[in-house]
Amino acid sequence: MNKTELLAPAGSFESLAAAIESGADAVYLGGTKFSARAFANNFDNETIRKSVRYANIRGVKVFVTINTLILDEEINDAIDF
């Protein structure tokens, strides 16, 4: 039988922690690169690492979104990200 999972958005480390502590099975977040929310307080690389560690300790999945069109010349940067 498939288990239903609760996936919550996280706009900051504080909201990520709140979602996890409230029972989210997974969270998704945007980084400072390749995000349509260009003027939002997106996660920098260090905060992504901190968030993944925090979530993994608690058995929660983290999905990092890329939600912009990627130009040919950005492919390698997107793969690195």
Image (cartoon, rainbow, N blue to C red):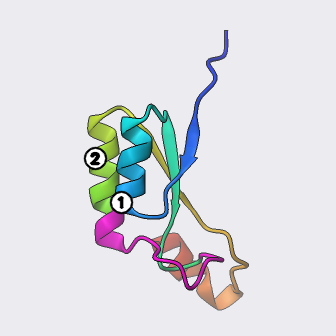
Would you say the magenta stretch is mainly helix, strand or loop? Answer: loop
Q: For the residues carrying marks 1 and 2, which lies nearer the camera in this image?
A: 1
Q: Which residues fall within the magenta stretch?
A: 35-48
Above or below residue 20? Residue 43 is below
Extreme-top residue of the structure: 1
Chain-order first, disc 1 or disc 2: 1
Above or below residue 15? Residue 71 is below
| Residue beneath the point at 46% across and 72% down | 81
Q: Quadrant of residue 13?
A: bottom left
Tag on residue 42?
none
Q: Residues within 10 Å of mark 1 (few under 14, many from 20)?
A: some
Check residue 37 for magenta coloring.
yes
Check residue 41 for magenta coloring.
yes
- Is label 1 in contact with label 2 (beta carbons under 8 Å)? yes
| Residue 62 x/y as whole percent | 46, 48
| Residue 44 x/y as whole percent | 37, 74
- Mark pair 1, 2: CA separation: 10 Å
In the displayed structure, does residue 78 sit left or right of residue 22?
right
Residues 65 and 6: in front is 6
In the displayed structure, does residue 7 sit left or right of residue 22?
right
In the displayed structure, does residue 76 sit left or right of residue 4?
left
Above or below residue 27? Residue 39 is below
Residues 13 and 72: in front is 13
Q: Amino acid at mark 2?
A: Tyr
Q: Residues within 10 Å of mark 2 (few under 14, many from 20)?
A: some
Disc 2 on helix, strand or loop? helix
Q: Amino acid at mark 1?
A: Phe
Q: Which residue is mark 2?
A: 54
Residues 69 and 73: in front is 69
In the displayed structure, does residue 37 sit left or right of residue 32?
right
Q: Which residue is mark 1?
A: 13
